[in-house]
Image: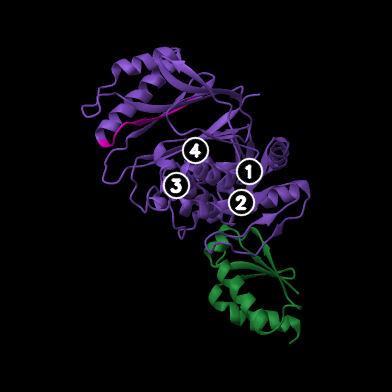
Chain colours: A green, B purple
Amino acid sequence: MEITICIGSSCHLKGARDIVSKLETIIAEKNLADKIHLKGAFCMGKCSIEGVSIKLDEELFYLKPENTEQFFQDEILRRLGA
Amino acid sequence: MKLKVDISYKSLNKRNEELCGDHIELLKTENSTILILADGMGSGVKANILSTLTAKILGTMLYNGSSLDECVETIAKTLPICQTRQVAYSTFTILQIYDSGETYIVEFDNPGCIFIRDGKLLELPFYDCEVAGKNVKECRIYAQAGDLFVLMSDGVTHAGVGRFCDFGWGWSGASQFVEQHYSGNEAPSRVTSGLTEYCHDLYEQSPGDDTTVAAIRVIDKKPIKIFTGPPLNKEDDERIVREFMETEGTSVICGGTSANIVSRVLDRPLEVSLEYFDPDIPPMATMQGIDLVTEGIFTLNRVLQLLKQYNEGSVDHIFFSELDKKDGGARLAKLLIEESTDVKMFVGKTINSAYQNPMIPFDFNLRVALIEQLKDAIEKAGKTVSITYV
């Protein structure tokens, strides 16, 4: 599964780096590195929406850093069928 | 071929002195650059007056076409005579580099000019001659891109005297230091800051003499082009990307949307990294055929900060360790400072919604304001800048 995180200027301000490091930590803790591929992207054109733009495969989400764990449980694990 | 020069100089004052007894004079004539380093006898005010007068007279007269004989004669007649020593005295070195590469060096009692070519210390072919009754050394060579000339006062070669070494580390110590720290691509300010800081250490932070280093690097014209910001009209994207690609020089894209546009027009994939070399600067990306792809405002703001620091003049090893970092801002600043002479910018006028975010912690809500500040800073660093707003 591919997770694409926008690291453009606007998403940087909204905490993209926090989200990247939180996701990296969770993936390492859960030993999911072979199942999940983290990827960067520049501006996805949704700067005015609250939250960092994130794509799970082709579906777009807007994520705040503090909701990363919840998002991982709800969306990512569910998709992995775990 | 027209060569350019990149110049840096730095002095340490003798301990407890407010004024430096060494003086650097830099002049640009129509087709050459003249750098003069004079070291006045004694220290403090007296030395400062002697060296300033000497360097100013030499510079002004040479600029106006006088011969070296006339200059030296004038200096001999003008300098005030020292009460204690009954002589008027200032040593000097003159280095003149023409756009053609033709180079002329005259030395009067200063330590010899250090010359580095292709990363190697070479001996300059000096010959002795007499000018207005004084024994001076002259040398004529053709400089080429990458050459480095380092002038210094004897405070440099005497550093460490009586402490770490009986007679200071000498010309050989100083010249080896320069050879080790210059391979052909570094800014001369690395040499001046490195050498003066090392002398400061040899003097145990208390210089026994005024210590001055002046470095000139000879450079070729090196163009760089930067595309930043989406063009105002989407219809122009393709034309501007083509124009950008056809322009000569190292290619840089600053801005996520801009990078996406180039990727789309050229149909080349954009690989965005997630590696943060600096927590405040978003990661970079790679695209085939483009030398550097970075995020926009945060990166350019860092570039501006680094350029401003560089332009303040007293850069040290702390500055260069910042400049050698791997984040996009440091990389672009380094390209601009050390590896380019002519900067061409393609600046899109579309206002990015990211710019209107009230959370932006610094003072620019418009890309144009930032670009104008960057232009000033790059020009102050001695480069030419041209901007096309699109």
- Tag 2, which secondary structure? loop
Q: Quadrant of the N terminus of chain B?
A: top right
Tell me whether circle 3 and circle 4 mark residues in contact (CB < 8 Å).
no
Q: Does the CB distance between marks 3 and 1 fall below 8 Å? A: no
Distance from disc 1 to disc 4, alpha carbons, whole Å, reads: 20 Å
The residue indicated by pointer 1 is: B227
Under circle 1, the secondary element is strand
- Residue annotated with mark 3: B315
The reply, left or right, for residue A66 in relation to residue B252 is left
Dividing the image into 4 quarters, which one contains the C terminus of chain B? top right
Image coordinates of residue B346 in percent, x first then y, are 61, 39
Tag 2 residue = B255
What span is colored magenta in the figure?
B34-44
Residue type at the position of mark 2: Gly
With respect to residue A54, does B381 lie above or below?
A: above
3D distance between C-alphas at marks 2 and 3: 28 Å
Q: Earlier in the sequence, mark 2 or mark 3?
A: 2
